Image: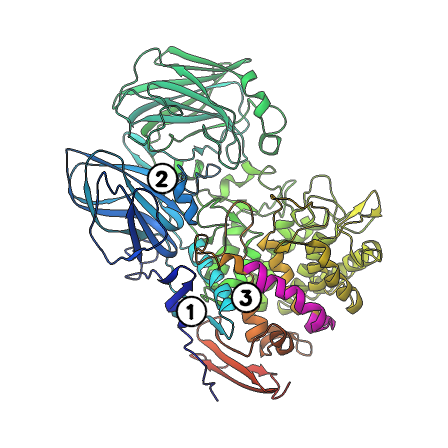
Amino acid sequence: MMLNLPRSYAKLWAIFVWGLGIISLANPITKPKVGSRSQTSYTPVAFGLGTAPVIDSLQPYSGTSVTLDSSTPVLTLDYAADVAGFPYFEVTSLTGSATQIELKYSEQFNGLNLDSGDGPWLYTNGLSNSFRTETFNITIPGTTESFFIQGAQRWQTVELLSNTSITISNIGFRASVEINPPDTLVGGFCASNDVYDGLWSLGARAVQASCVEADSQPSTWEISGDGALIRGQYPGTSALGMKYGDYTMSFSTKITRGGTGWRVAAGPNAGYGAYFVLTSNGPQYLSTDNATVPSDSLIATYGFSIVNFYLSSAPPLYYANPFPILDDEWYRVSTTITPSGYNISVNDTQFALVPYTTFLPYVNAGFGGSELITTGSWGFGPFQDQVAYVKDVEVIGQNGTMLYTNSFTSTDILAEYLVASNAYAVCLDGAKRDREVWIGDFAHTAKELAVSTGRYDFIESMIEFTFAGQFTSGPAAGIVPMQDSMGSAPEYQSVYYPSQYGETDYELFFLLTLGDYYTLTSNASFLSKYWNGTKLLVDAMLTYIDPSTGLLANPSASWFTAQGQQNATAPTALFATSLQQLAIVASALQDLTTAAHYTALSANLSTAINTQLWNPTLGAYSTALANGVREGYTSVLAAAFTIRAGIANSSQATSAVQALDALFYLIGYKDSSAVGNSATTQLSPNVQGFLLESLFLAYTQLNVTAEVVVPVLHNLLDVYWPQMLNQNEYFTGASWEYFVSSVGSAPTYVLTNYILGVRRELDGDTGEYGWVFDPVLEIAEGLGLTWVYGNVPLYGGGWIEASWAIENGTVTSSMDVNDAEGVKVDVRIPSHL
């Protein structure tokens, strides 16, 4: 029978109630067409007028015409939750011949009070606006749309810069992704605790914002017979010149607004290296910081950009132009890498010799080595709000050899410069910043997709995309791209090895995702297309096993899951788990030899961990061996992954969970007990997400008692993750992606799988995965829950609808399969506790 729930299942989705009022969710107006520029629009739900951004006393917005003038120059817009797309606005009237306005974007409200919004993000191009503010010069009424995508923001301001007035209406974002309210998704979750509903929704919105359809993110360059029209953005760098050095790079450029920008000697690690901006003497926007970007000047720096963000660059050097640089005139710019510096000329007139010595103290070894590099490629990207054409690029070696030439009049160059439209549907590390395809983070995202949007096609496309870039020969044979760009192409992948492969265990996370995909779908046919590639990747990972310890250790490897240490528990246990799952896939594919091989390998890794890394003194697994001896530190992932792999027995798992007390700081768990406590201590939702799932596995598979597990779950679900919900100025409707922590939405799938209790499990008799309805009621009751209701998407369509409630020790429940045939669910829920 169906439960008569105390309140509507849709109550969370219709409104979010926070301390500062009731905010209805921003809804899309029409459904976008896959593969074309979307016609969906996201519009604000509330607005306010004043002399500065306002968060209190906002008024409902419904296409309201708003006038900005000298007394009320700032319009604040609240979209209630993260939206993404191309900003647009309609001007119905203005005074004067021209009016300038600045648009600013931020996920958290406080970003609106900063000059740069909650950016800029000058690390990758990301097929989006690198800056979180942009200025528009309006001369006539009408609709204006930004060229660039803004990837995720709840808040926006429009500020009048000129001494005029302007009336604006119909403002919003033309969608670059389709984000729907949770109550419209196939999956859903609702419980007697509102907070848990909110936690579930964070991941449901985050994956919608971060997973983009194929061809939905257009190139940030426009190609024509006049060359590439490039607006202010993080430079796109050629994949073809990474090994060139001591060359002269020349190009023709025509500035249409503000300036032009370029790189030389740029490394494969995000183009880190020398960066130059040449400004014109034409009119500048009123928002231009003339101290940072003076007119008619050459600006030089080393790093990522001429301004700092969360990754530093050298203080810029400034040189006055020997002759005026005019807008809408073509100039020939040359940069020669000399023994002492960068020699820059325009139309054969020297503009500056930029010495290396000035930049040496600021070289970041993490990106370009310990010394300033003079070998590397070239790239192009003007600074903020600037626009310029670039064409006829030439690179000439010291001996006069032509190393490279390109007219820049064909779209063939876009993938070379990492700015091609995305050919695959992919899930980004984050919707706003670092918009790259990190396969490690996808280990969470895949399972979030499965329980919320049901977009299994995104998981399949991610697998296809990743294998398309796999090395099949050479020293990196088997390795797949761990940090790829949407705008690149597989043929350029070798250029970025090994510098863009710094987290070796991300390869292991991809193996884990392959196993998770089979767990979720039982689709061996799909994985069979990539089985040879899968085995090649496993073979590559086997080369990292230290023969003396049987643990993962190699001087060329860096393990994110173990804070970079070798012979460590977490990555070795992660590999063991991946092999366990892939052994099941191998059996399904009738590759019994491989299945037996992977099972034996996993057992060997497990034994190596237990014999060398269990630390009785700590009552937990040591993070790693140090000089062959167990360290006196433990970590969250050492506990989480040994539990998930079944390496820990019941007593070890119990002790390891209890030892987590040493890692708790303020509101959450530090990655390691070696990390100190301070205002900058990071508490990663990514890492704690793996812990969250492992606690349920400790209870269900390793007989760890509820008394041990529930206090830690309480810290995670009632203390840590609610920080993303309970402060209006920081609430975004999606899991946080700020630079002080990694993104993480694990509660979305963990709540569905274990609290609602609908999940896939392996049948030990048949060796096949199937659906079960088996909520962990003792844990749920320990967390104070009395009822839960939800939907779980099915692979191939349809969904499972389930619910349960507890009253006076009696359990009532229901379960139905909708719009699907032949789906069996093993109902294990008891009638009494």
Using the rendered image of the protein, determine whether residue 552 is visible from the camera's viewpoint. yes
Count all numbered tags in the image, as a single digit: 3
Task: Identify the residue shown where x is 37% and y is 68%.
Answer: 14
Residue identifier under label 1: 12
Left or right: residue 327 compared with residue 480? left
Q: Position of residue 608 (x, y in %)?
A: 81, 56
Using the rendered image of the protein, determine whether residue 372 is visible from the camera's viewpoint. no
Judge whether 175 appears above or below 832 on screen: above
Q: Position of residue 172 (x, y in %)?
A: 29, 51
Question: Where does the magenta region start and end?
Answer: 699-721
- Which quarter of the image is occupied by the C terminus? bottom right
Amino acid carrying label 3: it is Tyr
Task: Identify the residue shown where x is 59% and y is 87%.
Answer: 808
Residue 249 placement: quadrant: top left
- Assess disc 2: are there few (<14), some (14-19) or many (≥20) residues with their C-alpha within 10 Å of its C-alpha: many
The answer to the question of whether label 2 and label 3 lie on touching residues, with beta carbons closer than 8 A, is no
- The kind of secondary structure element at disc 2 is strand
- Assess disc 1: are there few (<14), some (14-19) or many (≥20) residues with their C-alpha within 10 Å of its C-alpha: many
Mark 2 vs mark 3: which is more N-terminal? 2
Amino acid carrying label 2: it is Thr
Task: Identify the residue shown where x is 33% and y is 62%.
Answer: 27
Judge whether 782 appears above or below 471 on screen: below
Mark 3 vs mark 1: which is more N-terminal? 1
- The kind of secondary structure element at disc 1 is helix
- The kind of secondary structure element at disc 3 is helix
Mark 1 vs mark 2: which is more N-terminal? 1
Q: Nearer the viewer, residue 354 or 109?
A: 109
Q: Position of residue 799 (x, y in %)?
A: 46, 75
Residue identifier under label 3: 749
Q: Which mark is residue 133?
A: 2
User: Is the magenta region chiefly helix, strand or loop?
Assistant: helix
